[in-house]
Amino acid sequence: MFPDQIVPLDTQLSWKNRFVGDESFNIEELLPPTSPLLEQLSISSGKSDSTSSSGFDTSGVVKQVKLSEGKVKIEHGPIERLGMPAMTMMFRVEEPDQLKGLDKGAEVVFNVDNTDAGFSITHLESSSGSFDATGIVKQVKSSDGKVKIEHGPIERLGMPAMTMMFRVEETSQLEGLGKGAEVAFNVDNTSAGFSITQIELVGGSDSKRFDANGMVKSIRTAQGKIKIEHGPIDRLGMPAMTMMFKVKDLDDLNALEKNMQVEFDVANGPGGFEITRIKPVSEMKPESAMAKVESRVCYTVGPFYKRTKVDLVNRRYQENGIVTKLSSTTDREYVGDMIYIESQESRQAALDIGNKLKQSGISDTMILNEPGKRNALSLGVYSQKQNAMRIKTEVEAMNIPVKFEARYRTRTLYWLHNEQLDPKGPLDLLTADDIESGIRQTINNCKFGEGA
Protein backbone atom coordinates (compact mmCIF):
# COMPACT_ATOMS: atom_id res chain seq x y z
CA MET A 1 0.00 0.00 0.00
CA PHE A 2 2.84 2.40 0.85
CA PRO A 3 5.63 3.24 -1.64
CA ASP A 4 9.30 3.23 -0.78
CA GLN A 5 9.33 6.93 0.17
CA ILE A 6 6.92 6.34 3.09
CA VAL A 7 7.44 3.10 4.98
CA PRO A 8 5.39 2.90 8.22
CA LEU A 9 5.14 -0.57 9.75
CA ASP A 10 2.00 -2.37 8.63
CA THR A 11 -1.02 -1.75 10.93
CA GLN A 12 1.17 -0.11 13.55
CA LEU A 13 0.60 3.61 12.98
CA SER A 14 -2.19 5.24 14.93
CA TRP A 15 -2.85 7.81 12.18
CA LYS A 16 -3.20 5.21 9.44
CA ASN A 17 -6.57 3.92 10.61
CA ARG A 18 -8.06 7.41 10.94
CA PHE A 19 -8.73 8.00 7.24
CA VAL A 20 -12.47 8.22 6.63
CA GLY A 21 -12.99 7.71 2.88
CA ASP A 22 -11.28 7.19 -0.45
CA GLU A 23 -10.79 10.94 -0.95
CA SER A 24 -9.08 11.43 2.39
CA PHE A 25 -5.63 11.15 0.91
CA ASN A 26 -3.82 10.28 -2.30
CA ILE A 27 -0.75 8.22 -1.53
CA GLU A 28 0.58 8.81 -5.07
CA GLU A 29 0.82 12.55 -4.51
CA LEU A 30 3.50 12.42 -1.84
CA LEU A 31 6.01 15.23 -1.58
CA PRO A 32 9.31 14.49 -3.39
CA PRO A 33 12.01 12.74 -1.31
CA THR A 34 14.96 14.71 -0.01
CA SER A 35 17.84 14.84 -2.50
CA PRO A 36 21.13 12.99 -1.79
CA LEU A 37 22.85 16.39 -1.66
CA LEU A 38 20.62 17.56 1.19
CA GLU A 39 21.14 14.29 3.03
CA GLN A 40 24.90 14.74 2.83
CA LEU A 41 24.69 18.38 3.97
CA SER A 42 22.41 17.50 6.88
CA ILE A 43 24.70 14.70 8.04
CA SER A 44 27.80 16.88 7.82
CA SER A 45 26.15 19.71 9.74
CA GLY A 46 24.89 17.41 12.45
CA LYS A 47 21.35 18.80 12.09
CA SER A 48 18.55 16.42 11.26
CA ASP A 49 15.59 17.95 13.09
CA SER A 50 12.51 18.21 10.94
CA THR A 51 10.52 21.23 12.05
CA SER A 52 7.18 22.66 11.03
CA SER A 53 6.66 26.06 9.49
CA SER A 54 5.77 29.19 11.46
CA GLY A 55 4.74 27.49 14.67
CA PHE A 56 1.97 25.48 12.98
CA ASP A 57 1.79 21.70 12.75
CA THR A 58 2.81 21.82 9.08
CA SER A 59 2.63 23.77 5.83
CA GLY A 60 1.48 22.87 2.33
CA VAL A 61 -0.08 23.80 -0.98
CA VAL A 62 -3.84 23.77 -1.61
CA LYS A 63 -4.88 21.25 -4.29
CA GLN A 64 -8.69 21.58 -4.02
CA VAL A 65 -11.25 23.63 -2.05
CA LYS A 66 -14.77 22.35 -1.28
CA LEU A 67 -16.24 25.42 0.36
CA SER A 68 -19.81 24.09 0.56
CA GLU A 69 -18.59 20.97 2.40
CA GLY A 70 -16.05 22.76 4.60
CA LYS A 71 -13.18 20.68 3.21
CA VAL A 72 -9.79 21.35 1.64
CA LYS A 73 -7.24 19.04 0.01
CA ILE A 74 -3.64 19.97 0.85
CA GLU A 75 -0.26 18.63 -0.28
CA HIS A 76 1.58 18.99 3.03
CA GLY A 77 4.79 18.14 4.84
CA PRO A 78 5.15 15.71 7.77
CA ILE A 79 2.98 16.30 10.85
CA GLU A 80 5.37 14.98 13.50
CA ARG A 81 3.02 15.51 16.43
CA LEU A 82 0.60 13.01 14.84
CA GLY A 83 3.28 10.75 13.32
CA MET A 84 1.92 11.52 9.83
CA PRO A 85 4.29 11.55 6.82
CA ALA A 86 4.20 14.05 3.94
CA MET A 87 1.23 13.38 1.64
CA THR A 88 -1.78 14.90 -0.11
CA MET A 89 -4.93 14.66 2.01
CA MET A 90 -8.50 16.00 2.26
CA PHE A 91 -9.21 17.66 5.63
CA ARG A 92 -12.34 18.87 7.37
CA VAL A 93 -12.10 22.51 8.49
CA GLU A 94 -13.73 23.29 11.82
CA GLU A 95 -14.33 26.91 10.79
CA PRO A 96 -15.26 26.80 7.06
CA ASP A 97 -15.04 30.61 6.84
CA GLN A 98 -11.26 30.17 6.84
CA LEU A 99 -11.60 28.70 3.33
CA LYS A 100 -13.07 31.91 1.86
CA GLY A 101 -10.70 33.46 -0.66
CA LEU A 102 -8.50 30.35 -0.71
CA ASP A 103 -7.71 29.07 -4.19
CA LYS A 104 -5.89 26.09 -5.67
CA GLY A 105 -2.12 26.63 -5.48
CA ALA A 106 -2.23 28.82 -2.37
CA GLU A 107 0.52 28.23 0.19
CA VAL A 108 -0.88 27.64 3.68
CA VAL A 109 0.13 26.77 7.24
CA PHE A 110 -2.27 24.96 9.55
CA ASN A 111 -2.93 23.05 12.79
CA VAL A 112 -4.65 19.66 12.93
CA ASP A 113 -6.57 17.75 15.60
CA ASN A 114 -7.20 13.98 15.48
CA THR A 115 -10.94 13.91 16.32
CA ASP A 116 -13.68 11.27 16.32
CA ALA A 117 -14.71 12.54 12.87
CA GLY A 118 -11.18 12.18 11.51
CA PHE A 119 -8.40 14.72 11.02
CA SER A 120 -9.78 18.27 11.30
CA ILE A 121 -8.01 21.58 10.67
CA THR A 122 -8.47 23.85 13.68
CA HIS A 123 -6.60 26.86 12.29
CA LEU A 124 -5.60 27.68 8.72
CA GLU A 125 -3.69 30.67 7.39
CA SER A 126 -2.38 31.64 3.98
CA SER A 127 1.40 31.95 3.91
CA SER A 128 1.59 33.30 0.35
CA GLY A 129 4.07 36.11 0.14
CA SER A 130 6.36 34.54 2.73
CA PHE A 131 9.84 33.39 1.76
CA ASP A 132 11.74 30.15 2.26
CA ALA A 133 14.76 31.91 3.75
CA THR A 134 16.70 35.12 4.20
CA GLY A 135 20.42 35.67 3.79
CA ILE A 136 23.34 37.90 2.79
CA VAL A 137 24.59 38.07 -0.81
CA LYS A 138 28.24 37.01 -1.06
CA GLN A 139 28.66 37.08 -4.87
CA VAL A 140 26.58 37.93 -7.96
CA LYS A 141 27.28 36.38 -11.38
CA SER A 142 24.77 38.23 -13.55
CA SER A 143 26.13 36.81 -16.82
CA ASP A 144 25.66 33.25 -15.51
CA GLY A 145 22.33 33.96 -13.84
CA LYS A 146 23.71 32.89 -10.45
CA VAL A 147 24.02 34.31 -6.95
CA LYS A 148 25.90 33.04 -3.88
CA ILE A 149 24.02 33.56 -0.61
CA GLU A 150 24.91 32.93 3.03
CA HIS A 151 21.47 31.91 4.28
CA GLY A 152 19.57 30.39 7.19
CA PRO A 153 17.90 26.94 7.20
CA ILE A 154 15.42 26.20 4.40
CA GLU A 155 13.14 23.91 6.35
CA ARG A 156 10.80 23.06 3.46
CA LEU A 157 13.74 21.42 1.65
CA GLY A 158 15.50 20.10 4.76
CA MET A 159 18.52 22.29 4.02
CA PRO A 160 20.67 23.56 6.93
CA ALA A 161 22.15 27.06 7.17
CA MET A 162 25.08 27.42 4.74
CA THR A 163 26.63 29.49 1.97
CA MET A 164 25.57 28.25 -1.47
CA MET A 165 25.53 29.27 -5.16
CA PHE A 166 22.01 29.25 -6.66
CA ARG A 167 20.66 29.50 -10.19
CA VAL A 168 18.08 32.28 -10.63
CA GLU A 169 15.19 31.43 -12.95
CA GLU A 170 14.59 35.08 -13.90
CA THR A 171 18.01 36.72 -14.21
CA SER A 172 16.40 40.18 -14.26
CA GLN A 173 15.85 39.75 -10.51
CA LEU A 174 19.63 40.07 -10.03
CA GLU A 175 19.56 43.72 -11.13
CA GLY A 176 20.42 45.98 -8.21
CA LEU A 177 21.79 43.16 -6.06
CA GLY A 178 25.30 43.58 -4.71
CA LYS A 179 27.64 41.91 -2.26
CA GLY A 180 26.43 42.43 1.30
CA ALA A 181 22.78 42.93 0.36
CA GLU A 182 20.23 41.32 2.69
CA VAL A 183 17.69 39.32 0.68
CA ALA A 184 14.67 37.06 1.09
CA PHE A 185 14.06 34.31 -1.46
CA ASN A 186 12.16 31.18 -2.51
CA VAL A 187 13.84 28.01 -3.83
CA ASP A 188 12.75 25.02 -5.91
CA ASN A 189 14.66 21.73 -6.19
CA THR A 190 14.68 21.22 -9.98
CA SER A 191 16.37 18.78 -12.32
CA ALA A 192 19.03 21.47 -12.90
CA GLY A 193 19.67 21.86 -9.17
CA PHE A 194 18.43 24.36 -6.60
CA SER A 195 16.92 27.37 -8.38
CA ILE A 196 15.69 30.64 -6.91
CA THR A 197 12.19 31.44 -8.17
CA GLN A 198 11.84 34.76 -6.37
CA ILE A 199 14.32 37.07 -4.64
CA GLU A 200 13.84 40.48 -3.04
CA LEU A 201 15.92 42.93 -1.07
CA VAL A 202 14.96 43.06 2.60
CA GLY A 203 13.90 46.56 3.57
CA GLY A 204 13.60 47.78 -0.03
CA SER A 205 16.76 49.13 -1.67
CA ASP A 206 18.68 49.70 1.59
CA SER A 207 21.18 46.85 1.51
CA LYS A 208 23.22 48.31 4.40
CA ARG A 209 20.41 48.37 6.94
CA PHE A 210 21.54 47.81 10.53
CA ASP A 211 20.06 45.31 12.98
CA ALA A 212 19.16 47.93 15.59
CA ASN A 213 19.50 51.49 16.84
CA GLY A 214 20.09 52.64 20.39
CA MET A 215 21.78 54.94 22.89
CA VAL A 216 25.21 54.31 24.43
CA LYS A 217 24.92 53.97 28.23
CA SER A 218 28.54 53.10 29.05
CA ILE A 219 31.80 52.07 27.34
CA ARG A 220 34.44 49.70 28.72
CA THR A 221 37.27 50.21 26.25
CA ALA A 222 39.77 47.98 28.09
CA GLN A 223 37.31 45.05 28.02
CA GLY A 224 36.09 45.73 24.49
CA LYS A 225 32.48 46.09 25.66
CA ILE A 226 29.66 48.61 25.32
CA LYS A 227 26.28 48.90 27.04
CA ILE A 228 23.45 50.04 24.75
CA GLU A 229 19.79 50.84 25.39
CA HIS A 230 18.34 49.58 22.11
CA GLY A 231 15.12 48.75 20.31
CA PRO A 232 13.99 45.24 19.24
CA ILE A 233 16.47 43.20 17.19
CA ASP A 234 13.91 41.34 15.08
CA ARG A 235 16.39 39.09 13.29
CA LEU A 236 17.44 37.58 16.64
CA GLY A 237 13.99 37.71 18.26
CA MET A 238 15.36 40.08 20.94
CA PRO A 239 12.99 42.66 22.51
CA ALA A 240 13.93 46.23 23.37
CA MET A 241 16.28 46.31 26.37
CA THR A 242 19.56 47.63 27.81
CA MET A 243 22.39 45.17 27.31
CA MET A 244 26.18 44.86 27.48
CA PHE A 245 27.73 43.68 24.18
CA LYS A 246 31.21 42.58 23.16
CA VAL A 247 32.60 44.55 20.20
CA LYS A 248 34.50 42.70 17.47
CA ASP A 249 36.59 45.67 16.28
CA LEU A 250 37.86 47.62 19.29
CA ASP A 251 38.74 50.61 17.07
CA ASP A 252 35.00 51.20 16.64
CA LEU A 253 34.78 52.26 20.29
CA ASN A 254 37.10 55.24 19.74
CA ALA A 255 34.42 57.13 17.80
CA LEU A 256 31.70 56.61 20.43
CA GLU A 257 30.65 58.51 23.55
CA LYS A 258 28.14 58.04 26.35
CA ASN A 259 24.56 59.14 25.41
CA MET A 260 25.42 58.96 21.68
CA GLN A 261 22.82 57.51 19.31
CA VAL A 262 24.28 54.56 17.37
CA GLU A 263 23.22 51.91 14.86
CA PHE A 264 24.79 48.46 14.89
CA ASP A 265 24.79 44.84 13.72
CA VAL A 266 24.90 41.86 16.09
CA ALA A 267 26.11 38.26 15.66
CA ASN A 268 25.06 35.48 18.05
CA GLY A 269 28.25 33.41 18.30
CA PRO A 270 29.73 30.81 20.66
CA GLY A 271 30.90 33.58 22.98
CA GLY A 272 27.52 35.30 23.13
CA PHE A 273 26.17 38.39 21.38
CA GLU A 274 28.89 40.41 19.64
CA ILE A 275 28.61 43.70 17.74
CA THR A 276 30.19 43.28 14.31
CA ARG A 277 29.49 46.80 13.00
CA ILE A 278 28.61 50.03 14.85
CA LYS A 279 28.61 53.73 14.01
CA PRO A 280 27.09 56.98 15.27
CA VAL A 281 23.74 58.02 13.78
CA SER A 282 24.67 60.89 11.39
CA GLU A 283 26.87 63.61 12.90
CA MET A 284 24.37 65.19 15.31
CA LYS A 285 25.34 65.87 18.90
CA PRO A 286 23.94 63.67 21.65
CA GLU A 287 21.79 66.54 22.96
CA SER A 288 20.03 67.10 19.62
CA ALA A 289 19.56 63.34 19.20
CA MET A 290 17.80 63.17 22.56
CA ALA A 291 15.57 66.10 21.65
CA LYS A 292 14.50 64.27 18.51
CA VAL A 293 13.54 61.16 20.49
CA GLU A 294 11.62 63.20 23.07
CA SER A 295 9.53 64.93 20.38
CA ARG A 296 7.62 61.68 19.83
CA VAL A 297 6.77 58.53 21.71
CA CYS A 298 7.59 55.12 20.22
CA TYR A 299 6.91 51.70 21.69
CA THR A 300 6.76 48.03 20.76
CA VAL A 301 3.85 45.75 21.61
CA GLY A 302 4.22 41.96 21.64
CA PRO A 303 4.93 39.18 21.22
CA PHE A 304 1.81 37.94 19.43
CA TYR A 305 1.53 34.27 18.50
CA LYS A 306 -1.29 34.65 15.97
CA ARG A 307 -1.58 37.05 13.05
CA THR A 308 -5.31 37.48 13.73
CA LYS A 309 -4.53 38.69 17.26
CA VAL A 310 -1.93 41.27 16.24
CA ASP A 311 -4.29 42.57 13.52
CA LEU A 312 -7.03 43.00 16.14
CA VAL A 313 -4.77 44.97 18.51
CA ASN A 314 -3.32 46.94 15.60
CA ARG A 315 -6.80 48.21 14.68
CA ARG A 316 -7.29 49.50 18.26
CA TYR A 317 -4.22 51.72 18.00
CA GLN A 318 -4.85 52.86 14.42
CA GLU A 319 -8.40 53.91 15.33
CA ASN A 320 -6.80 56.22 17.92
CA GLY A 321 -4.53 57.87 15.36
CA ILE A 322 -1.36 55.91 16.22
CA VAL A 323 1.11 55.19 13.39
CA THR A 324 1.91 51.46 13.44
CA LYS A 325 4.32 49.08 11.74
CA LEU A 326 4.23 45.25 11.88
CA SER A 327 7.24 42.92 11.98
CA SER A 328 7.77 39.24 12.68
CA THR A 329 10.49 37.00 14.08
CA THR A 330 10.87 33.25 14.43
CA ASP A 331 11.14 31.33 17.66
CA ARG A 332 12.39 27.74 18.08
CA GLU A 333 10.04 25.76 20.33
CA TYR A 334 10.91 22.47 22.02
CA VAL A 335 8.33 19.76 21.15
CA GLY A 336 9.73 16.76 23.00
CA ASP A 337 12.25 13.94 22.84
CA MET A 338 12.13 11.42 20.02
CA ILE A 339 13.22 7.93 21.06
CA TYR A 340 14.48 5.83 18.17
CA ILE A 341 16.56 2.86 17.09
CA GLU A 342 19.47 3.76 14.82
CA SER A 343 19.52 3.12 11.06
CA GLN A 344 19.46 -0.54 9.99
CA GLU A 345 21.17 -2.06 6.98
CA SER A 346 17.86 -2.56 5.18
CA ARG A 347 14.16 -1.87 5.41
CA GLN A 348 13.52 -5.53 6.14
CA ALA A 349 15.87 -5.41 9.11
CA ALA A 350 13.91 -2.46 10.50
CA LEU A 351 10.63 -4.34 9.88
CA ASP A 352 11.96 -7.34 11.79
CA ILE A 353 12.77 -5.17 14.80
CA GLY A 354 9.35 -3.53 14.55
CA ASN A 355 7.62 -6.91 14.55
CA LYS A 356 9.67 -7.99 17.57
CA LEU A 357 8.60 -4.85 19.43
CA LYS A 358 4.98 -5.41 18.44
CA GLN A 359 5.04 -8.87 20.02
CA SER A 360 6.09 -7.18 23.27
CA GLY A 361 3.25 -4.67 23.11
CA ILE A 362 5.12 -1.71 21.56
CA SER A 363 3.16 -1.11 18.39
CA ASP A 364 3.28 2.65 17.69
CA THR A 365 6.49 2.64 15.62
CA MET A 366 7.49 4.02 12.25
CA ILE A 367 10.42 3.55 9.91
CA LEU A 368 12.10 6.92 9.32
CA ASN A 369 13.03 8.21 5.89
CA GLU A 370 14.94 11.39 6.63
CA PRO A 371 18.57 12.47 6.15
CA GLY A 372 20.89 10.55 8.45
CA LYS A 373 18.16 8.16 9.61
CA ARG A 374 17.37 5.88 6.66
CA ASN A 375 15.69 2.72 7.96
CA ALA A 376 15.85 3.99 11.54
CA LEU A 377 12.85 3.12 13.71
CA SER A 378 11.01 5.89 15.58
CA LEU A 379 9.25 4.89 18.81
CA GLY A 380 7.52 8.26 19.12
CA VAL A 381 8.08 11.84 20.28
CA TYR A 382 7.37 12.38 23.99
CA SER A 383 6.83 15.72 25.69
CA GLN A 384 7.02 13.98 29.08
CA LYS A 385 10.50 12.64 29.85
CA GLN A 386 9.20 9.86 32.10
CA ASN A 387 7.13 8.39 29.26
CA ALA A 388 10.17 8.28 27.00
CA MET A 389 12.24 6.66 29.74
CA ARG A 390 9.58 3.99 30.25
CA ILE A 391 9.73 2.99 26.57
CA LYS A 392 13.54 3.15 26.64
CA THR A 393 13.68 0.75 29.60
CA GLU A 394 11.29 -1.72 27.95
CA VAL A 395 13.22 -1.76 24.67
CA GLU A 396 16.67 -2.00 26.25
CA ALA A 397 15.41 -4.96 28.28
CA MET A 398 15.15 -6.72 24.90
CA ASN A 399 18.86 -5.97 24.22
CA ILE A 400 17.96 -3.35 21.61
CA PRO A 401 19.88 -0.05 22.04
CA VAL A 402 17.87 3.16 21.70
CA LYS A 403 18.77 6.84 21.36
CA PHE A 404 17.19 10.18 22.27
CA GLU A 405 16.98 13.28 20.13
CA ALA A 406 15.36 16.61 21.04
CA ARG A 407 12.77 17.71 18.47
CA TYR A 408 11.80 21.29 17.78
CA ARG A 409 9.44 23.30 15.65
CA THR A 410 9.55 26.96 14.71
CA ARG A 411 6.78 29.45 15.25
CA THR A 412 6.28 33.02 14.09
CA LEU A 413 6.17 35.83 16.65
CA TYR A 414 4.57 39.13 15.59
CA TRP A 415 5.52 42.56 16.94
CA LEU A 416 3.65 45.88 16.64
CA HIS A 417 5.80 49.03 16.50
CA ASN A 418 3.85 52.20 17.35
CA GLU A 419 4.62 55.92 17.12
CA GLN A 420 2.66 58.90 18.46
CA LEU A 421 3.40 62.62 18.63
CA ASP A 422 2.64 62.90 22.32
CA PRO A 423 5.35 63.57 24.94
CA LYS A 424 3.03 62.62 27.80
CA GLY A 425 3.64 58.89 27.33
CA PRO A 426 2.49 55.95 25.21
CA LEU A 427 -1.17 55.10 24.75
CA ASP A 428 -1.83 51.68 26.32
CA LEU A 429 -4.78 49.83 24.76
CA LEU A 430 -3.92 46.32 26.00
CA THR A 431 -6.66 44.39 27.76
CA ALA A 432 -6.33 42.14 30.80
CA ASP A 433 -6.56 39.12 28.47
CA ASP A 434 -3.71 40.51 26.34
CA ILE A 435 -1.46 40.93 29.36
CA GLU A 436 -2.37 37.47 30.70
CA SER A 437 -1.26 35.93 27.40
CA GLY A 438 2.20 37.52 27.76
CA ILE A 439 1.80 40.59 25.54
CA ARG A 440 3.76 43.61 26.80
CA GLN A 441 4.28 47.24 25.77
CA THR A 442 7.89 48.47 25.79
CA ILE A 443 9.31 51.93 25.01
CA ASN A 444 11.86 52.03 22.16
CA ASN A 445 14.06 54.71 20.61
CA CYS A 446 11.91 55.59 17.58
CA LYS A 447 14.44 54.21 15.11
CA PHE A 448 12.48 51.20 13.87
CA GLY A 449 11.88 51.30 10.13
CA GLU A 450 13.68 54.60 9.45
CA GLY A 451 15.31 54.62 6.06
CA ALA A 452 13.43 51.50 4.98
Image: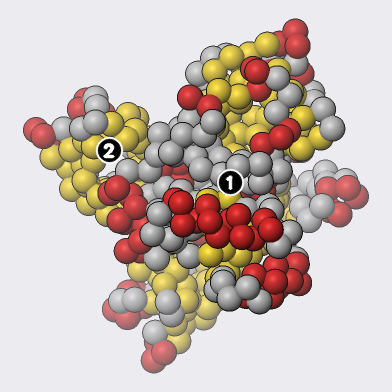
**Image point (60%, 42%), residue name:** 10
Find residue 194 and name its label.
Answer: 2
**Image point (53%, 64%), residue name:** 341
**Image point (38%, 59%), residue name:** 345
Find residue 59 and name its label.
Answer: none
Q: Residues within 10 Å of mark 2 (few under 14, many from 20)?
A: some
Q: Amino acid at mark 1?
A: Leu
Can residue 206 be seen at all in this image of the molecule? no
Q: Of helix, strand and loop, which one carries label 1?
A: loop
Residue 409: horizontal and vertical position, in percent?
59, 52
Direction from residue 133 to residue 399 in the image, left or right? right
* 431 w.r.t. 280: above or below: above
Q: Nearest to the eye among marks 2 and 1: give it.
A: 1
* 72 w.r.t. 301: above or below: above
Q: Nearer the viewer, residue 418 or 95?
A: 95
Residue extending furthest toward the top: 68
Direction from residue 52 to residue 17 in the image, left or right? right
Q: Nearer the viewer, residue 403 or 59?
A: 403
Residue extending furthest toward the bottom: 222
Q: Amino acid at mark 2?
A: Phe
What distance separates the C-alpha of mark 2 from that of mark 1?
Answer: 33 Å
Residue 94: horizontal and vertical position, in percent?
80, 26
Q: How many marks?
A: 2
Direction from residue 299 to residue 163 in the image, left or right? left
Residue 320: horizontal and vertical position, in percent?
78, 33
Residue 380: quarter of image: bottom right
Q: Which residue is mark 1?
A: 9
Can residue 1 be seen at all in this image of the molecule? yes
